Every structure is written in C-alpha cells, then in structure tokens.
Image (cartoon, rainbow, N blue to C red):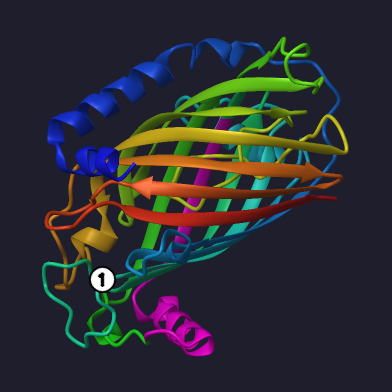
Amino acid sequence: MTNFLDLFGDQKSVRQGVFAGLIAASATGLWAGAAHAIDKPLDQSQYITLQFDNDMFGGTDRHFTNGMRAAWLSQEGGAPRFIRDAASFVPFFKATRRMRMSFSVGQNIYTPEDISLTDPPRDDRPYAGWLFAGIGLVAENGSVLDKLELDIGVVGPYSLANEVQTKWHKLIGITEPRGWNTQLKTEPGATLFYERSFRQFHELPLHDVIPIENLGVDFTPHIGGALGNVFTHGAAGFTVRFGDDLPNDFGPPKIRPNLPGSDFFVPDDSFGWYLFAGAEGRVIGRNIFLDGNTFRDSRSVDKKYFVGDIQMGFAVTFLRARLAFTQVFRSAEFDGQEGFNSFGSAALSVRF
C-alpha cells in the first residue's frame, strides 16, 4: 500500500491518469439515472449525525489532524417550497418534492509536521482552523442523489482550533502544539458545494456459496465541485459497497473535502452490514489552508493541483442507527510534503 500511495502522490502523470479515469467512470451513467424517479411514500424519518475524524487512526499527528461535525437532516419533503423553487435555478441540481433540508456545524484543524516547534519551517503546512455552519439541500430518487450545501464560517484564531487541540493534547498526555501563534489570520469564509451521485444496485446470486440470503453490491460514481474562498475544486470518483441488507443510502458521510456520502439511510432489516471502498480525484483551484489568507499576508505553501483520495471501511446498521468507520489515504497536497496522509473517520447516524 505504501509503495502504491507514494507513486500516486509523487508522479504527476499517474495522478493525472487516475483523475481522468475517475472522470470517465463517474460520467458513465451518471446523468442517465436522473429521470428515473421512483413513486414511493415520503420517508418521514429525520436524522442526526455525529462525526469524528482524526489522524491518530493513521498513526500521525500532522496536516489534517482533526475534524468534528454534527448534522440534522429533515424528513423527505421537509424543505420549504420557496427553497425548492430557488434550488430549481441551480444548474444540474434536480429539485423535487422529496427534497430534504440539512443543518450542520463543524470544525477542522490543520497543523505542520512537527507540532513541538514554536516556529515551524516556512515550507511546511501552516497551522489553521476552520469553524463553520452549513445549510444544505438533499434530493434523492432512489438512484440519484443531488447535494447542495453552503458552508459559512471563520478561519484563524476565532475558529478555536488552538484551544481545542491544546486542551485535548493536555488531557490525553501527548505533545503540546507550540506553534499556534503562526496560524492563518482571521478571515470569514464561504464555500458552495455541489455533488451528484448515481447508485446502481445488484443482488448477488451467492446463496449456494455463502449462507447469507441478502448479499448485494452497488457501484456509485459521483462528480461535483466547490466554489469559495476556502475551497475551490472539481472532483470525480466512485464508491463500491458489498454487504448484507444494503440500506438505501449512498455510503457513510464524510467531512469535506472528502468523498461524499449521505446522512440518511433506510435499512431493509433490523440488522445489516457492508464493506466499502472508493477513490476520488480533485483538481484544486484554491485551498486556503495551503494558499494562505486571501487578502492578508500569511504563511502558505505551494499546493499541488491534483490530489487523490483512497478510502475503505465498513458500516453496521442496527434498528434505527448506523455506525461507520472509514480509513482515508490522501496523496501529497503541497510541494515538499513527504509521503501521503492517512486519517480515520467515525460516524454515527440515528433515525427518529
């Protein structure tokens, strides 16, 4: 795995080839399913999701080092009519009566390689925090998922990243970060995200080989992008799932800019499980956590314009809850970065 990911991160031609392949995979059938809406009763369940991302799952303490997110998702048809009407003017977004509305809050923390230094090297990733709130729309018809979300927040000291990381490290007795006085300066931030995912499901005729009746597999390509002073990029990728009683969802959610998923899930039984793996390539226009502040002088590094993620993990659904764990491997994001980054993501979603 290490050799492959080093190649993936270091060789520009390989990254470009992988990204081109992801675009081709995502384009295959991605738009064809948009018209196949299914006529079924509206799902009246609402959802709460709690997420925790941390690189301690990858054995490091650098770069994207921690992320937290809490989200609420309404029942189908929970978006007000005037919002649905406004969303219908957004290119590609398919506004329907089944649309859900979401609200979320979260925080991301970024640090350089060596957090014990009071003055980290200028060619390493700067300290930075991102505290945000998001409002979004989710439109789904059984095979196609459209997601539109606006995140608004603040970068810099008011993100409280310094306080959160310092107190957490003191609590668990590990190295105290000493370079937060060099972090990015205060800047309001806003980013609009759009994603479309297309899900194809297939039951597996393996009853004679594996004594499990409801084994299935699905393939979900996606394409999307972000526009704002925090993130600007285009993305394409896919996720493959395999398991028992696959719920009607699009995989577990991730903290952006990771691969997409869904906060909602509609299980077919009281218990189910699945394994999943996927990949995404991104063309980066702007990443404030690498490029530095927009209108003020700050620390920065020379970002790479092609970044790739590989993910793998598992999810378990039981009664009205889904628990998922994802391991993410990310290629180098800036010139001079040694190797890839790895971090884990745990997410708990509950229906009510």
Q: In this orientation, does residue 142 appear?
A: no
In the rendered image, residue 193 lying in the magenta stretch gets the answer no
> Where is 349 relative to 28, above or below?
below
Quarter occupied by residue 109: bottom left
* Disc 1 residue type (three-letter): Pro
Q: Position of residue 263 (x, y in %)?
A: 66, 45
Q: Residue at x 49, y 11 (%)?
A: 29
Residue 207 found in image quarter: top right
State the image coordinates of residue 46 (x, y, percent, origin top left): 79, 47
218 displayed left or right of 9: right
Give x and y (percent) for residue 180: 30, 83
Q: Quadrant of the N terminus?
A: top left
How many residues crowd around disc 1 within 10 Å: few (fewer than 14), some, or many (20 or more)?
A: many
The answer to whether 339 is drawn above or below residue 174 in the figure is above
Please provide the residue range marked out in magenta: 146-175
- Residue 72 visible somewhere in the drawing: yes
Residue named by callout 1: 112
Q: Is residue 261 above or below residue 351?
A: above
